[in-house]
Each structure stands twice: as C-alpha cells, then as structure tokens.
Image (spheres, rainbow, N blue to C red):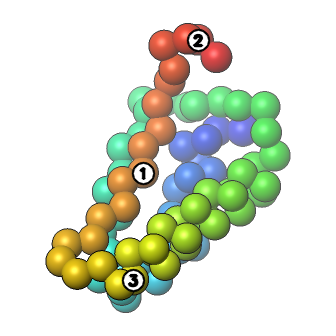
Amino acid sequence: ETDLNQVIRAALEVTAYGARSSGIIIDTEFAVGPLLAMADADHVTQVAANFLVNSQHALAGVAGDRLIKVRTFRSDRGN
C-alpha cells in the first residue's frame, strides 16, 4: 500500500522550486491520516510531479495571481 499524502508531498518537494521561481503559489490541503491506495509509490509520484509541472507551464503566461491547489481527500463512496 502507498500513502497518497506522502506521495503528493514528495512530488511537491521535487517541483516546488520551479513554482516558487515562477511566482506560482501552491496551496495544499491533505486528508487527515494516511490515505492508502494499492499503487506503486514511484509511479504515482512521477504522475503527480508531471501534473504539477504541466500546471506550472500552463500558468506561465497568465498575468496576476497564479495558484495551484493540491488536495487529497477520502471519497464518500468508500473506494
């Protein structure tokens, strides 16, 4: 099992410098406690890092405040 909160934090660590140097604010909100999933931590970290980098690139030409919101949560469906 992989804790998705830890995986997302790892991806944020890898990509945070690029966001800061571009003036992009990353706002985070994590589920309380471990958020476990049957997944490969390295692969999910890479996917999350790619989403973050793509988001930074998409905001590159945007004037004004630039914000990326990252949130983990438990589904009401129990999945």
Amino acid type, mark 3: Ala
In the rendering, at what x and y percent does residue 40 appear? 81, 46
Name which quarter of the figure residue 22 lies in: bottom left
Name the residue at 58% across, 11% down.
78
Q: With 46 as the anchor, is 61 left or right in this view? A: left
Instruction: Report the Cα–Cα distance between label 2 and label 1.
Output: 21 Å
Q: With 23 as the anchor, is 44 left or right in this view? A: right
Instruction: Report the Cα–Cα distance between label 3 and label 2.
Output: 37 Å
In the rendering, at what x and y percent does residue 66 appear? 27, 71
State yes or no: discs 3 and 1 in contact (Cβ < 8 Å). Answer: no
Name the residue at 55% across, 72% down.
53
Q: Residue furthest bottom?
A: 21
Amino acid type, mark 2: Gly
In the rendering, at what x and y percent does residue 44 appear? 72, 51
Q: Nearer the viewer, residue 67 or 12?
A: 67
In the rendering, at what x and y percent does residue 39 appear? 79, 39
Q: Residue furthest left?
A: 64
Query: Is residue 9 visible in the rendered structure shown here?
Result: yes
Q: With 68 as the anchor, is 58 left or right in this view? A: right
- Which residue has dot 1 on it? 70
Q: Nearer the viewer, residue 30 or 78?
A: 78
**Up-down relation of residue 76 to residue 31 (above or below):** above
- Which residue has dot 2 on it? 78
Q: Report helix, strand or loop for mark 1.
A: strand
Instruction: Report the Cα–Cα distance between label 3 and label 1.
Output: 18 Å
Total labels: the figure holds 3
- Which residue has dot 3 on it? 60
Q: Report helix, strand or loop for mark 3.
A: loop
> Looking at the figure, which quarter contains the C terminus?
top right
Name which quarter of the figure residue 71 lies in: top left
Of discs 3 and 2, which sits in the foreground? 3
**Disc 2 residue crowd, few under 14, some 14–19, many 20+, Cα 10 Å:** few
